[in-house]
Image (cartoon, rainbow, N blue to C red):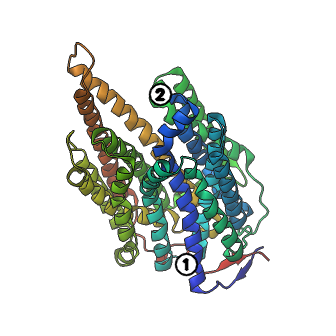
Amino acid sequence: MSAISKPKKHTSHWFILVLLALAQFMVVLDISIVNVALPTIQHAFSLTLSNLQWIVTAYALGFGGFLLLGGRNADYFGRRITFLIGIGIFTLASLGTGLSQNGTMLIIFRALQGLAAAYMSPAALSIVLVTYKEGHDRNTALSVWGAVAAGGAAIGVLLGGIITQYFSWRWNFFINLPVGIFVIIASLKVLHHHKNEANKKVSLDLPGAISVTLGLMALVYSLTEAPTYGWTSARILSILGFAIAMLIFFAINESRAKQPLMPLSIFKIRNISGANSLMLLMSAGLFSVFFFTTLYLQDILHYSKIRTGLDFLVMPVVVALVATNVPRIIKRIGYKPILVVAPLIVSSGLFWISHIPVAGSFWVNVAPGLTLMGIGMGALFVSATIAATSGVPHHEAGLASGILNTSQQVGGVLGLALLTGVLSSSITSYLNSLHLHGLPTVHQIAVANVHGFRIGYLIAAGFAFLASILATIIIRINKSESDPSHGEHVVISAA
């Protein structure tokens, strides 16, 4: 049984939060920072387009496939050790990625980065959950976490542009080395040891671990590759069928296992089910926004990579300002009203951007929409994280963190696959409607692309609107003081 010790001074708790948020920032950053560098990497290694996309897909497969296993590993075998192993492998994999001499080597190390991130991210969030007492303190800590999650991708676009243009694409990965080493050294000094809190001998649910990992990896792969091979291709349908079969087996196994990897009883906490469903929908719309908007600014408005990145800074700045003030609002009215209204604000921002013209202006046609989205995202990510983790016993904090991360990752991949497919078909349909007798002009291609972007933004706005309806129906008014896990605040250390 783990020993219980009094927490260190309040200031040490905030230093722990900074460390954990920094690690999460690395995870989010590496999802987006590589996108700007892809053309340079393609030229350096003479990669085909199909091979190039694997630089992104490999990370998504490792990350999305192992999140549940990583979260449960933190609960079973220790949050601190899981976090340290994760960030250690992530840092080494970043070094390997930067030193890669060919495309195959780079893709392998990117997969290792994703695998490591799947362990460090849920472990870090679970440490936050057990370090801060439910209520205003935890909500404030999660506001920082939410700001990092919502703003990291936009900052990645800027950093990727600057580093790629003025240094080398390799430094997009080398930048993780000093940060990772600092986090490891500091974590060894300030993070408490943790052992199993369930007061029982545990054994890893191997059938559950294998089936959910294979199922999630197959699902992420099929959704990512669907735009390339087609949704009705035999390749995609067979892999998607395998994914569904594995996930069904996983659900059946979890209902019968003595020590399940993911006890299905956790979904009896209604707000956890609702918050994860909401985040899946929101991520489905938001992941594609960065992709579409980057293409619009660079290919249609002909902005440079650095200017595109600087323009995206509007969103993380707004997110940070909103996220830091959300805990005070939650303390007064709870998180349900925010979860109902915030998606509507995001939806209105997407609706604004859906009116982009070919000869547009960032500050007129894009910035107002990004500002509205930043307001909604800053409020939403914090509130949804609180709703998805409130009322969870400490010994299942890693599980709750893994489920939340999985919802975001799978939702993002699903949305990007769907909306990319919609974009391609919309562009083709528009050009066919012109009844051209030769190749389309540059202007006609630009108009067709903008037409596709508009439809994509409108669908994303619909996802956000649907998320608001879900929040209205499913989420219960629940203040943290009444949550079942609310109790004396303790910090766990090894006996």
Between residue 162 and residue 210, name the one nearer to us: 162
Residues at marks 2 and 1, CA–CA distance in whole angstroms: 45 Å
Residue 486 placement: quadrant: bottom right
**Residue 490: image location, x then y, percent:** 64, 80
Query: Does the image show residue 172?
Result: yes
**Most extreme residue toward the top, as rendered?**
437
Q: Please, what is the three-letter code of the amino acid marked with disc 2?
A: Thr
Query: Does the image show residue 249?
Result: no
The residue carrying mark 1 is: 14
Residue 250 placement: quadrant: top right
**Residue 88: image location, x then y, percent:** 70, 58
Between residue 10 and residue 434, name the one nearer to us: 434
Residue 190 against residue 261 in the figure, above or below = below
**Residue 122: image location, x then y, percent:** 60, 59
Between residue 129 and residue 366, name the one nearer to us: 366
The residue carrying mark 2 is: 228
Q: Secondary structure at mark 2?
A: helix
Query: Mark 1: few, some, or many residues within 10 Å (few <14, many ≥20)?
Result: some
Instruction: Name the N-terminal-most of marks 2 and 1.
Output: 1
**Which residue appears at 43% of the width and 74% of the height?**
479
Q: Secondary structure at mark 1?
A: helix
Which of the image's four quarters has the N terminus? bottom right
